[in-house]
Image: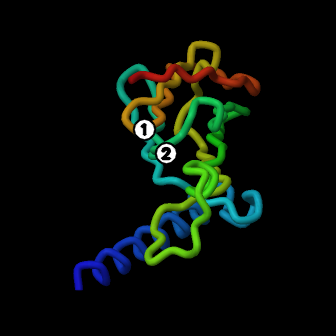
Amino acid sequence: MADLHKAFQRMSEDLERLVDDFFLGRPPFFNSPRGAFTPPTDIFETESEICVRVEVPGLDRRDVQVAMQGDSLAVTGERKNPCEIEGGAIRGFHRKEIHSGPFVSKVRLPSPVDAEKARATYDAGFLIVRLPKRTTPHERRNIPIDVRF
């Protein structure tokens, strides 16, 4: 019964994200690469910066890219299939809830930021991008990721 409740809760959250994407003008999921999933993403702000936190556990720094273009931030990458990670042949799943393959999280930022001063860290399965607020938008820039252990 708890599994059914979790499934409905996740479906509700996915539907809410889809509706938010549509009404907030974010790129819809069908503009993503074929088969890509959208990891859970939080956007929040402090007095001086916009923060984007993306839940992407189990990744290597080389598997994630972060880029700014105009007022949008894109986090893209790929989570390896367990078959590729563990080297053994999986005959079939008894349960599969963890997404693998390409992922995309594209968000429109609520205010202009200084992409030149952006910082990205990966810690405990979360990619956190900190973008200082600014008064004018900036062009596309890749943001390096620091990994903490």
Q: Relative to 128, is 90 above or below?
A: below
Q: Is residue 146 left or right of residue 138?
A: left
Under circle 1, the secondary element is strand
Task: Inspect the image, locate mark 2, and give the three-letter code of the amino acid beneath it.
Answer: Val
Front-lying residue, 64 or 133: 64
Q: Residue 116's spot in the image, x, y percent?
A: 64, 14
Q: Which residue is mark 2?
A: 56
Give how far across and how far down residue 115 sits, in percent. 63, 20
Going from the N terminus, do you reach mark 1 or mark 2 first? 2
Q: Do the numbered discs 1 and 2 sit on residues whose CB atoms are within 8 Å?
A: yes
- For label 1, count other residues whose C-alpha is less than 10 Å away and answer few (under 14), some (14-19) or many (20+): some
Q: Quadrant location of the N terminus?
A: bottom left
Furthest-front residue in view? 88
Residue at the left extreme?
2
Q: Which mark is residue 88?
A: none
Relative horizontal placement of residue 51, taking residue 76 as reference (left or right): left
Above or below residue 54? Residue 111 is above
Residue at 75% x, 60% y: name it: 31
Q: Residue 103 at x, y = what percent? A: 63, 52
Cα separation, mark 1 vs mark 2, equals 6 Å
Front residue (pair 136, 19): 19
Q: Give the residue type at disc 1.
A: Phe
Q: How does the figure colour the protein chain or chains?
A: rainbow
Residue position marked by numbered label 1 in the rendering: 126
Position of residue 110 measured from the top left corner of the image (x, y, whole percent): 52, 39
Q: Residue at x 48, y 43 (%)?
A: 58
Few, some or many residues within 10 Å of mark 2 (<14, 14–19, 20+): many
| Picture mark count | 2
**Residue displayed at 53% across by 69% down:** 19
* On screen, residue 70 above or below 149: below
Q: Quadrant of residue 4?
A: bottom left
